[in-house]
Image (tube, rainbow, N blue to C red):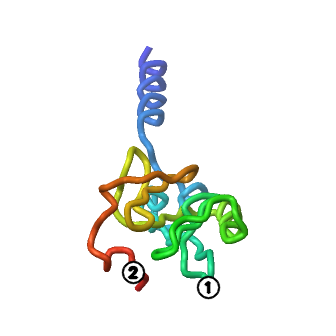
Amino acid sequence: MACPSLACCLLCLVALTSACYIQNCPLGGKRAVLDMDIRKCLSCGPGGKGSCFGPNICCANGLGCFMGTAEALRCQEEKHLPTPCQSGGMRCGTRGRCATQDICCTQTDCFLDPACNPPESAFSES
């Protein structure tokens, strides 16, 4: 009777632990994937002055956004890269980021948003 109880307790203990075993640990520990830095999206547009916001959207300060044009072609490379990226300034809309003055973009579209009206230095490339 003690053997089945001990085996049951041991099985429960193993099932409830979330140990990081040598063969399946990500580099940097268990939470390394969650702490990964988000890189800046690829540059695009005339003179590489814009940033990709989606596979067909390139926005450049002072020039606006190019959607589905030759300027945005480079943005299609973004979907083949293994790490996520982020473009733009502050959050706007429901899932977007400010791309240029008064324009908010998500990965699929752009729209006018008065929240994207910060000081001019907010969109400057550093």
Query: Residue beneath label 2, please?
Result: 124
Say if 114 sits above or below 8 in the image: below
Residue 107, how many percent across, how many down?
A: 55, 53
Residue 74 or 62: which is nearer the viewer?
62
Asked where in the image residue 16 lies, by quadrant, the reply is top left
Q: Is residue 10 left or right of residue 22?
A: left
Give the residue displayed 54% in from the left and 65% down from the top: 65
Measure how far apart labels 2 and 1 are at the Cα level. 15 Å
> Could you say whether the residue bearing mark 1 is in a helix, strand or loop?
helix
- Quadrant in which the C terminus appears: bottom left
Label 1 sits on what residue type?
Answer: Gly
* Residue indicated by mark 1: 47
14 or 68: nearer the viewer = 68
- Identify which residue is drawn at 48% across, 29% down: 11
| 16 relative to 108 in the view: left or right | left
Where residue 53 appears, as percent x and y from the top left, is 54, 61
The quadrant of the image that shows the N terminus is top left
